[in-house]
Image (spheres, helix red, strand yellow):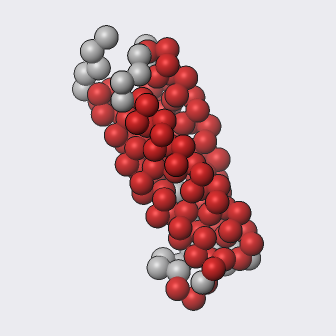
Amino acid sequence: MEKQGFHRWVWLIVFLLGGLLMIYGGAQDLAIFFSPDLVPVPSWHSVPPIIGLVCGLIVLTSAVLNLIWGWQMRHAESVQERKLARRIALISTVAMTADWICGYYGFGSLMALLAAIWLIRKK
């Protein structure tokens, strides 16, 4: 089956926004633990440094998984693609929630989540 239109580029959204952008997001969450004075973008609210560490590790793990699964999605067939989309939706939800706890938006995880939901719902 030939992927056309938006379907052809969903993997790139997951790869770039859910993966590469969220590596930056996870590093920023980790900065709350390692150097709170040097955080590039202040969060909505202050969080204890240990929360920044835990949430940062969750977001980084999610970003790496989104990179791997996004790349695999590039050439995946229908059944495998939906399976990957379910995994991406789950891990992106967890990462987005962790980013919210740290006081950031989790935009990349949100976009990966929305793209995965679109793929799951696509007939």
Q: Could you tell me how many numbered marks the image carries?
A: 0
Q: Position of residue 24 (x, y in %)?
A: 46, 64
- Whether residue 44 is visible to the viewer of this picture, yes or no, is no
Q: Quadrant of the C terminus?
A: top left
Nearer the observer, 104 or 27:
27
Residue furthest out toward the bottom: 37
Taking the spot 48% from the left edge, 77% from the top edge, the residue there is 41
Looking at the image, residue 6 lies above or below residue 20: above
Locate residue 16 relative to residue 26 in the image: left or right.
Answer: left
Looking at the image, residue 94 lies above or below residue 82: below
Locate residue 18 relative to residue 4 in the image: left or right.
Answer: right
Residue furthest out toward the top: 1
Nearer the observer, 101 or 1:
1
- Whether residue 36 is visible to the viewer of this picture, yes or no, is yes
Q: Quadrant of the N terminus?
A: top left
Toward which corner of the image does residue 104 lie, by quadrant?
bottom right
Taking the spot 52% from the left edge, 50% from the top edge, the residue there is 63
Looking at the image, residue 104 lies above or below residue 76: below
Q: Position of residue 89 (x, y in %)?
A: 56, 36
Looking at the image, residue 97 lies above or below residue 74: below
Taking the spot 25% from the left edge, 21% from the top edge, the residue there is 4
Toward which corner of the image does residue 71 lie, by quadrant?
top left
Q: Position of residue 45 (x, y in %)?
A: 64, 75
Q: Position of residue 27 (x, y in %)?
A: 53, 67
